[in-house]
């Protein structure tokens, strides 16, 4: 383990994992598709899908591996140690699925009334989600993805049913164009100020070209008694229906957003960087997924007396206060339901066993970290400037914007020390004259009482439409997560109290 001052020089061994990550990032264009990409991998690895609506008791077995989702945008996956007993602890890697291009990073979401036009152009009404660097969305080729509610008829009963379908239109169907320099004042040229309501409505097409088809589309919907459809851009409805292979009249509602069509790629003179949208926080989601699958296939499960978990939440970028964000009951509920499923009975001991499990548990709250920018190095505290490809970052803030304390930070360092191979770690503290962001760490620790440390892989351009990280840090993160599932219990038992 190092302080993070030494950066890797040979990157060839990191490229295979980085290429796999590129595919993951390109496919995961919104929280729904991020979770779908994860569940497809879990299905292939033999994980069993659970229903939140059904009791876990009688279904879970020791040595089993399971997952469930909430709202199709939050995921909990776990492996039950073969020696697990009710009251034992949970090893949790926590991250978030919402990202800047629609997964829980800042991005542009389609408004409930999507129809918008101006100056001969057909546009789409959008709302800003989270705190984005909105100027980076200009002059990008934008696709559309999200969730669509579709009306169908149940073949057995003849009753109407509503299906949830996922959509990704990879074609660049929208664009937000920059105003040319010739029409800007000197003041406007000096400071690119974005009015989020006036300047960010993407252009879909030309009215004169589309208006006849739009009129025909509206006429075809004339007998449709759903007023929601009449407030949508007809061409958007037609495009969605075509992509899903359904009729326009079957569309009941949608949650759509825009994403940058450019796929993730390797870059830098030695391919040492990964350029992609949505790294914050799909970087964590990818590495967490890889680690839980790897662990589930290892011999260590047969010796483990704890439950290993990844919990990937939606809505981190807007405060986590939702039915399926980190501020929801999901984390505490997972610990309680899994613990109860292995209780001998449903007696009052359940409460005590749950409390015991909480005290033995630990969360790695993992969100991407701020690498020091060479052009703005003075924005970092001089002794706490993490570098890309320099290792996973431990985040500390004495005002509890991060959940790290002396004990939890020590545990993270011990995990790196006991890991197979060399795992560098770095430290981050925000400058005393700068505000500090926050993560799901303080939210989970305060809601559940579970000890937590805040970590992250370093990146630049956080909350931009396109971001960058070092490829070595994907492997650094994966090896640290593997060590967590393998070595946490031993480290925890060595700590007094």
Image (spheres, grey):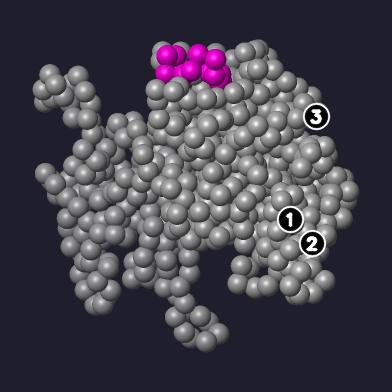
Q: What is the x, y in percent for residue 355?
A: 70, 58
Label 2 with label 1: CB-CB less than 8 Å: yes
What residue appears at the point 79 percent right and 55 percent down from the top-left corner?
88
Q: Residue at x 73, y 55 (%)?
A: 357
Q: Is residue 379 magenta?
A: yes
Q: Which is the main secondary structure of the residues drawn in magenta?
A: loop
Look at the image and tell me whether residue 338 can be seen. Answer: no
Q: Residues within 10 Å of mark 2 (few under 14, many from 20)?
A: many
Q: Is residue 217 above or below residue 469?
A: below
Q: Quadrant of the N terminus?
A: top right
Q: Which residues are magenta?
A: 377-388
Mark with earlier residue (3, 1): 1
The residue carrying mark 1 is 357
Horizontal arrangement in the rendering, residue 373 relative to residue 214 (left or right): right
Label 3 neighbourhood size at 10 Å, few (<14), some (14-19), many (20+)? some
**Which of these two is toward me, 176 or 186?**
186
Q: Secondary structure at mark 3?
A: helix
62 above or below 6? below
Q: Which residue is mark 3?
A: 418
x, y (%) of residue 493? Answer: 82, 41
Give me the C-alpha separation between circle 3 and circle 2: 27 Å
Relative side of 148 to 221, left or right: right
């Amino acid at each position: 383990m190092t302080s993070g001052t030494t950066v890797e020089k040979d990157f060839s061994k990191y490229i295979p994992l980085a290429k796999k990550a590129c595919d993951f990032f390109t496919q995961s264009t919104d929280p729904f598709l991020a979770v779908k990409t994860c569940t497809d991998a879990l299905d292939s690895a033999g994980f069993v899908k659970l229903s939140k609506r059904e009791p876990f008791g009688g279904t879970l077995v020791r040595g089993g591996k399971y997952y469930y989702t909430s709202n199709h945008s939050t995921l909990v996956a776990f492996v039950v140690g073969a020696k697990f007993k009710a009251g034992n602890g949970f090893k949790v890697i926590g991250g978030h699925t919402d990202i800047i291009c629609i997964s829980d990073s800042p991005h542009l979401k389609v408004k409930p009334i999507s129809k918008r036009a101006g100056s001969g152009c057909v546009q789409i009404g959008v709302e800003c989600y989270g705190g984005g660097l909105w100027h980076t969305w200009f002059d990008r080729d934008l696709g559309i993805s999200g969730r669509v509610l579709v009306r169908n008829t149940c073949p057995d009963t003849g009753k109407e049913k509503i299906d949830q379908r996922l959509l990704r239109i990879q074609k660049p169907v929208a664009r937000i164009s920059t105003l040319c320099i010739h029409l800007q004042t000197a003041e406007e040229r000096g400071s690119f100020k974005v009015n989020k309501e006036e300047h960010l409505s993407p252009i879909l097409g030309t009215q004169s070209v589309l208006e006849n088809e739009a009129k025909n589309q509206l006429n075809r919907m004339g007998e449709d008694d759903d007023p929601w459809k009449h407030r949508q851009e007809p061409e958007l409805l037609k495009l969605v229906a075509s992509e899903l292979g359904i009729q326009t009249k079957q569309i009941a509602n949608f949650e759509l957003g825009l994403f940058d069509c450019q796929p993730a790629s390797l870059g830098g003179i030695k391919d040492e960087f990964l350029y992609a949208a949505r790294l914050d926080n799909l970087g964590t989601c990818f590495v967490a997924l890889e680690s839980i699958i790897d662990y589930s296939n290892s011999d260590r499960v047969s010796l483990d007396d704890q439950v290993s978990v990844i919990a990937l939440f939606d809505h981190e970028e807007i405060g986590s206060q939702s039915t399926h964000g980190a501020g929801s009951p999901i984390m505490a509920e997972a610990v309680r339901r899994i613990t109860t499923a292995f209780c001998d009975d449903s007696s009052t001991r359940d409460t005590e066993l749950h409390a015991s499990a909480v005290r033995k548990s630990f969360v790695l709250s993992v969100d991407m970290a701020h690498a020091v920018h060479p052009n703005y190095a003075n924005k970092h505290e001089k002794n706490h400037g993490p570098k890309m490809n320099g290792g996973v970052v431990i985040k500390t803030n004495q005002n509890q914007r991060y959940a790290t304390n002396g004990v939890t930070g020590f545990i993270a360092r011990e995990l790196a020390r006991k890991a197979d191979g060399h795992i560098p770690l770095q430290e981050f503290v925000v400058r005393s004259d700068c505000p500090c962001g926050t993560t799901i760490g303080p939210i989970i620790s305060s809601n559940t009482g579970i000890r937590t440390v805040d970590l992250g892989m370093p990146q630049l351009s956080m909350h931009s439409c396109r971001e960058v990280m070092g490829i070595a840090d994907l492997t650094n993160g994966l090896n640290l997560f593997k060590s967590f599932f393998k070595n946490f219990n031993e480290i925890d038992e060595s700590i007094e109290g």
